Every structure is written in structure tokens, then in C-alpha cells.
Amino acid sequence: MPNGPERMFRYLTAGESHGPALVGILDGIPAHLKLDVAAIDAVLARRQGGYGRGARMKIERDEVEFLAGVRGSETLGSPIAAIVRNRDYQTPKVRALMDPLTGAGDPLTNPRPGHADFAGALKYRQRDLRNVLERASARETAMRVCLGAICAQFLAALGITTRSYVHRIGAVDATELDDWNQDDVEASDVRCPDADAAQRMIDAIDAAKAAGDTLGGQFIVRVDGLPAGVGSNRQPAQRLDGILAGALMGMQTVKAVEIGLGAGVAAKPGSQAHDVFAMDGRDVVRTSNRAGGIEGGMSNGQPIVVRVSVKPIPTLMKALPSVNLHERADAPATVVRSDVCVVPAGAIVGEAMVRLALMGPVLEKYGGDSMEETLENLRRSNEAAEALFAQPERR
């Protein structure tokens, strides 16, 4: 049996990039959460956007369908089963290639550097790399975003929200922000609120496309409204920072995750690395948020700030050198329809992963079988926290 927060919540996804559909299961959402389906579809549409996306996103119109766990747009407390269909599968060529029972076609033999092709072929003993890359494809993240959008509605009911923006694409850095206007992010083609940097990012993407190349970058996710004490210092697997970092590192293309000052803390003396306490009237406050909202594996009541670095995607229109595994000869890497830059979409997936990662620790602290019970547990916990140091201890 699971020992950590995952015993309260878990999820699974299934599906191939060009298969009939993507499928997901959420287990642990309390009963009586009213779902806004249009809001879920809107988040799916946000994942499909962003400057630098490829032709595939012009084909798909991602929408959620529920198969179980929901009735009258309200959760039942039982596992939720959701599906997002792949429109690309409806084309005769793709259907003939990817039909689960009759699919056939020439094998893909030339692995792409930086992709799962080669290692996956060895692991699963697959001579056709398509049997690896179809599942390894980031198309799978559409279902994670779908499930994360459901979790967002649960978290919002508890006053917990997430948002994100793109901080870097390639060599172009935006001004790093402690706070930002999310409307400016949504209005930007690259999801960057710094208009000058956003234009330079677009120019960099255009240049990479012209060169047959790809670009990575960095995005920042912020969580507001998470009370202090979510997560635990008791066991390594229960530390909130480890849970968040593990979830984000589970994204395709992510190579680094930083919380608060992140790697920058290594160059700071202790006097410049921590968030000192102060009094504001009778309220205990902090003068900074260098820890990024997490201390000792637990939320400390400040905003959680996570910085995520994404590598350039490994499918280049100007193919990288590779080999033909069947002929044992040098050959260019396989070229499949793909994007130039996925960092703006990656920010949406990153938000989804943060939402999914928060669910277990939040439910472990406040969870109940129904939304009413969960909200009551949250209220009691907040009242107890406020009362803890309200009066001087009497001896």
C-alpha cells in the first residue's frame, strides 16, 4: 500500500500520440465538486496555443468527455474517467497506421538524439521506433492538462490558485517578476507579460524555424492561497518540494526545476538566503520569499514559486546525425511533424503538473469524502492555526 500522500489521490493516463484517444483516471476527488466543463476545455485550448506550435495543433480541437465518476456535472466521489479524442486519427492514413488491431506500416528505424526512441527500443525490445515514440510524445500531456484542470476546480474551491508565465525562450530573458498581471500573459503569443521581451522571443522562434532548428526556455509557476503546513518533514517522500519537483521533472523536455532562489542560493551567504520574520501589527510576516513558499518540506503560507527549464524539442526539420538501426549505418534522424518551440504550451502543462502534485498533500491534510467535509476540515485547520499563538502562553 502507498505510504505517502498518493494514498489519498492518484491518477493514470493512457493513449498514443496518433491513436484513437487519450484516456485518464482521477481517483480521490471528493463528491459534490461542481465541474465547469467549458473551463476544462478552455485550458485544453490554451495548451494548444503559443507561438512556434506545429501543424498538428491546427488539426486537433481538444475537448473532454466523461465516462465515469461524474453525473449532472458533479463528481460522485468515485474514480473519474475522462477521454480526449485525437482528430488526427480520423484521417485514413493515420488510422491505417495506428489502428489498435490492424495498424501496420514501414518501421521507423532512425532514433532522434534527445528523444526516447533509442532507449525505449532497447527497453521494450521494439524494432519499430514508432512503438516507443507514440507514447513518449508530448501529445500525452493533453490528458494531464485535462486532469489538472479538474484538480484546479477542486483547489480553487479551497482558495488555492495557480498561474504561470514564460520567462525565457532561447537566449531571450524577460524581466523576472515577483507578481504579474495574468491578463497580459494570456494576451501574449508566447505567454510573456514583458512585451519587449515577448517580441524578441517571437523573433528568435522565427529565426530558429528558418534554420530548421528548435528552441527551449524557462517558465515560472506560482501558487497562491496554499495554507502553511501542507506537506511534511517526516519522511522524504512527503516533502512538498520533492513532490513538486518530481512531478515537473516527469514532463517531457524538462531538465531542471528550481524553487524560490533555486540554483542561485548556492552563491548566497546565509544572511541573504533566508526569509526573516517580522511583525506587522499583531501579524507575523516575511520580508522576502527567497524560499519560494516552502521550508522544511512544508508550505509556509507564502506564494509557492517554481522555475522550470525546458530543453529544445528533439525533432528538428534539419535532422541531426543519427543511425539506421536496421542497416547499422549512419543516417539522419527521423523527422516527424513537430513544433519549433513548446515553452508557452509547457507552462500550461507545468501548471497542470503542479495542480496534480498538490492534490495528494492537500487531501492528506484536509481531505474528506465530500466537498462539504473537506471545506469544514480546512476551516477548522485555519481557525486552529490562527488561535495557536493568538494569546501568550500562560505558565
Image (tube, helix red, strand yellow):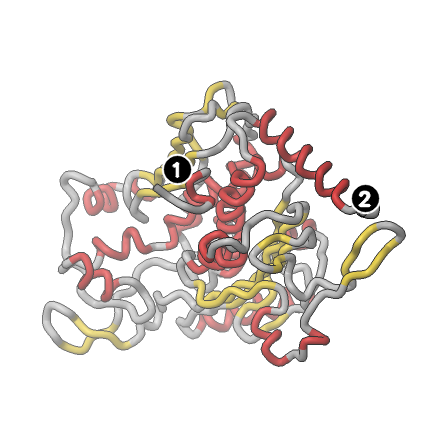
Residue at 46 percent across and 26 percent down: it is 77
**229 lies left or right of 94:** right
Badge 1: residue crowd in 10 Å (few <14, some 14–19, many ≥20): many
Residue 45 seen from this side:
no
Residue 217 falls left or right of residue 252: right
Give x and y (percent) for residue 266. 59, 77
Q: Secondary structure at mark 1?
A: strand
| Mark 1 → mark 2, Cα distance in angstroms | 50 Å
- Nearest to the eye among marks 1 and 2: give it: 2
Q: Which residue is mark 2?
A: 390
Q: Identity of the amino acid at label 2?
A: Ala
Residue 194 visible: yes
Picture quadrant where residue 132 is located: bottom left
Q: Which dot marks residue 84? A: 1
Image: 105 above or below 32: below
Residue 328 percent location from the top left of the image = 12, 74
Q: Is residue 355 left or right of residue 142?
A: right
